[in-house]
Image: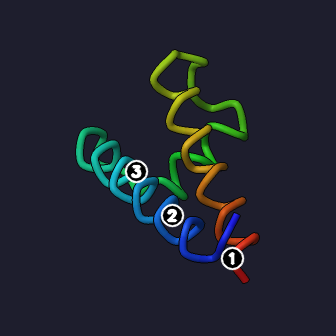
Amino acid sequence: MKREEILQDIHGLEAELEKLEKQNSVLSADFYCSYRAGKLEQSHDFIRWAGLYEAKQEREETGC
């Protein structure tokens, strides 16, 4: 992926994460820590949210 494509992906993922943060009144990083610690259910919505968060983290590492 080109740097430009990575940045577009990151911005798109950030927009999706912001929607989820507003819906659930919690930051994605805080959600993810609780989710990974097993403190939250394995619902479809939470699995999707965790996947989006992980994808953003991977894109940010790739874009360095």
Question: How many labels, in total?
Answer: 3
Q: Whole-percent x and y of residue 35?
A: 62, 37
Q: Amino acid at mark 1?
A: Gly
Q: Where is 54 relative to 46, above or below?
A: below
Q: In what quadrant of the picture does the N terminus appear?
A: bottom right
Residue in the picture at 54% in, 58% down: 29
Colour setting: rainbow
User: Quick one: SS at disc 2?
Assistant: helix
From the image, tell me which residue sits under label 3: 17
> Which of the pair 2/15 is nearer the observer?
2
**Pointers 1 and 2 in contact (C-beta within 8 Å):** yes
In this rendering, position of residue 9 left or right of residue 24:
right
Residue in the picture at 40% in, 50% down: 17
Q: Amino acid at mark 3?
A: Leu
From the image, tell me which residue sits under label 2: 10
Report, in whole angstroms, how far the alpha carbon at label 2 lies from the one at label 3. 10 Å
